[in-house]
């Protein structure tokens, strides 16, 4: 895995606020990771179901490596990392995001007092 430097000034120009961009990218990276993990788990479960064998009676038997499982694992390792994909999506403005309603706690109008909800 090689390190790919990122020009922060370009990233800042495209997003406006570096901290917001980092939050958006991190949340998107988690989504991508969850999707990739689910896909990998489904592939391995399908493979396990196809190659189901009865439990060995002797604990001393040597476990063999399934070549199909190894191939799937290697493909997963070669795929781009979720963080890299998320950063590219932020840079290309492919991720729509919105702000929560902003409450000004320092406003002079006391009729709109903010409430803290759990």
Image (cartoon, rainbow, N blue to C red):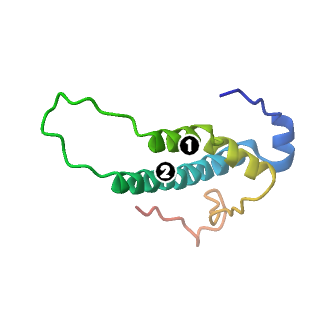
Q: Which mark is residue 8?
A: none
| Quadrant location, the C terminus | bottom left
- State the separation of the CA atoms marked 2 and 1: 7 Å
Do the numbered discs 2 and 1 sit on residues whose CB atoms are within 8 Å?
yes
**Comes first in the chain, label 2 or label 1:** 2
Q: Relative to 75, is 92 above or below?
A: below
Pick the residue in front: 73 or 60.
Answer: 60
| Badge 2: residue crowd in 10 Å (few <14, some 14–19, many ≥20) | some
Helix, strand or loop at mark 1: helix
Residue 4 in percent (x, y) is at 75, 30
Residue 97 in percent (x, y) is at 69, 61
Q: Relative to 67, is 118 above or below?
A: below
Q: Quadrant of residue 9?
A: top right
Residue 79 in percent (x, y) is at 63, 42
Q: Which mark is residue 40?
A: 2
Residue 43 in percent (x, y) is at 46, 54
Side of 48 relative to 59 (left or right): right
Helix, strand or loop at mark 2: helix
Find disc 1 in the rendering and name its residue: 76
Count the marks: how many? 2
The residue lying at 79 percent from left, 48 percent from top is: 91
| Quadrant location, the N terminus | top right
The residue lying at 62 percent from left, 52 percent from top is: 28
Side of 58 relative to 102 (left or right): left
| Badge 1: residue crowd in 10 Å (few <14, some 14–19, many ≥20) | some
Q: Residue furthest left?
A: 57
Pick the residue in front: 96 or 37.
Answer: 37
The residue lying at 46 percent from left, 39 percent from top is: 67
Q: Quadrant of residue 18?
A: top right
Pick the residue in front: 116 or 111.
Answer: 116
Pick the residue in front: 24 or 112.
Answer: 24
């Amino acid at each position: 895995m090689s390190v790919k430097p990122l020009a922060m000034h370009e990233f800042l120009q495209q997003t406006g606020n570096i901290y917001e961009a980092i939050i958006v990218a991190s949340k998107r990276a988690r989504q991508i990771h969850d999707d990739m993990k689910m896909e990998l788990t489904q592939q391995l479960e399908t493979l396990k179901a196809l190659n189901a064998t009865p439990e060995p009676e002797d604990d001393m038997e040597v476990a063999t490596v399934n070549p199909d499982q190894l191939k799937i694992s290697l493909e997963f390792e070669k795929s781009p990392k979720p963080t890299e994909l998320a950063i590219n999506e932020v840079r290309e403005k492919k991720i729509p995001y919105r702000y929560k309603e902003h409450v000004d706690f320092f406003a002079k109008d006391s009729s709109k007092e903010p409430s803290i909800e759990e």
